[in-house]
Amino acid sequence: MINSHRQGMTTTITSVEAILVDLPTIRAHQLAMATMQQQTLVIVRLRCSDGVEGIGEATTIGGLSYGDESPEGIKLTIDTYLAPALAGQDATNVHGAMARLGKVARGNRFAKSALETALLDAQGKRLGVPLATLLGGAVRSTLPVLWTLASGDTARDIAEAEQLLAERRHHTFKLKIGRRSVRDDVAHVAAIKRALGERARVTVDVNQAWNEADAATGIAMLEAAGIDLIEQPTPREQRMALARLAARFVVPIMADEAVCGPEDAMELARIGGADVFALKIAKAGGIFGMLRTAAVGDAAGIALYGGTMLEGSVGTIAAAHGFCTLPQLAWGTELFGPLLLKDDIVQQRPEYRDFSLHLPEGPGLGLALDEDKLAHYRRG
Ligand code: MUC
Ligand code: MG
């Protein structure tokens, strides 16, 4: 290795391409802050001097309504700043390449996550091992996956849940609330929980829509209705509100928008701000950032949950490799993104059965792009 470096044979990054891909959803997906009719993926192709190509994905929800980065902004950031910084760098040194990105860009975690995935995918393919093996090895090969009921219609949500239970695809359902009054939202959730009873676990995600008083009222009613988990009821900046709610109620409170990386996790752990952390590779700037966030949760006795930015197959499988290596993942995952999309840009869609996502076994991510589909759905 040292010799090949001396002889100038380092495997380098030769080009990075960021592609916007617009895919239609199977139905409208209603969240507190946006209604999605389609999803925009930012797909990264990272080519190396040994002919290996790695792929990655950065995806967000509802333009700028969920996070700090938009799909168009992510592409601009990669094209203008991050791709030039990577050109000529050692493709086999993922930490080295990411440290360089950390110097040229302060934030931009979503963009960095896509590039880190592409570097890891390339390195896995180069060495002939799955991405999870590069991380030290998977402790599980399947991940429990819930489904989000968010059609906006109670009867339709119940019918959807019944069908998915019958197909043995999901037995946990997350309801997106926060658009309507607290009373209307609770009535909607309680009706679904009543219909499903003990056959399903029901959780809610408020996506920061409530103030603390509304949250106290709403959570008391949701707890009485048998709801299992309350996700991000109040604004992400108001950490003490989250801490007071976590202290007040028995039903676990999960931080999502409030916990991006290990620093947020430290602060929330210090103030008792959450019972559960929703981990996402995009929020944490990549798989390694997600693992560091998880480690803080572990040390603080906070339960973990594998979250999604509703990525397509590339981002979903990248997260899955990371989540499969976690010592504890008490609340399972919501890695259902590819199932919300009508079509895909990979040759073999991820496998969902028996309430779980099954990790692919091939090298790197274990995925291959479908060039025709990519050409069809890419923007412009
Ligand atoms: C979020 O806020 O958790 C995850 C599932 C879903 O439907 O939306 C997301 C984002
Ligand atoms: Mg959430």
Image (cartoon, rainbow, N blue to C red):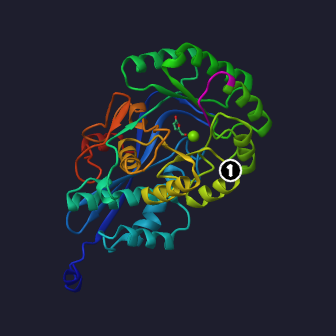
**Which residue sits at x=39%, y=44%?**
316
Q: Quadrant of ligand 2?
A: top right
**Which residue sits at x=57%, y=50%?**
301
Q: Secondary structure at mark 1?
A: loop
Quarter of image, res 269: bottom right
- Left or right of 324: which side holds 298? right
Quarter of image, res 215: top right
* Mark 1 Cα-neighbour bin, 10 Å: few <14, some 14–19, many ≥20: some
Residue 211 visible at all: yes
Q: Position of residue 353 (x, y in %)?
A: 32, 29
- Left or right of 108: which side holds 118? left
* Residue matched to label 1: 272
Residue 380 visible at all: no
Q: Position of residue 88 (x, y in %)?
A: 32, 74
Which amino acid is tagged 1?
Answer: Gly
Instruction: Write down the region rendered in magenta.
Output: 224-230
Queried on whether the Cβ of the residue with tag 1 lies below 8 angstroms from ligand 2, the answer reads no
The vertical placement of 45 against 350, above or below, is below
Q: Residue furthest bottom?
A: 6
Q: Nearer the viewer, residue 189 or 121?
A: 189
Q: Nearer the viewer, residue 247 or 264?
A: 247
The vertical placement of 13 against 36, above or below, is below
- Left or right of 50: which side holds 380? right
**Which residue sits at x=34%, y=27%?**
354
Image quarter (top left, top right, bottom left or bottom right) of the N terminus: bottom left
- In the rendered image, residue 227 lying in the magenta stretch gets the answer yes
Q: Position of residue 41 (x, y in %)?
A: 43, 45
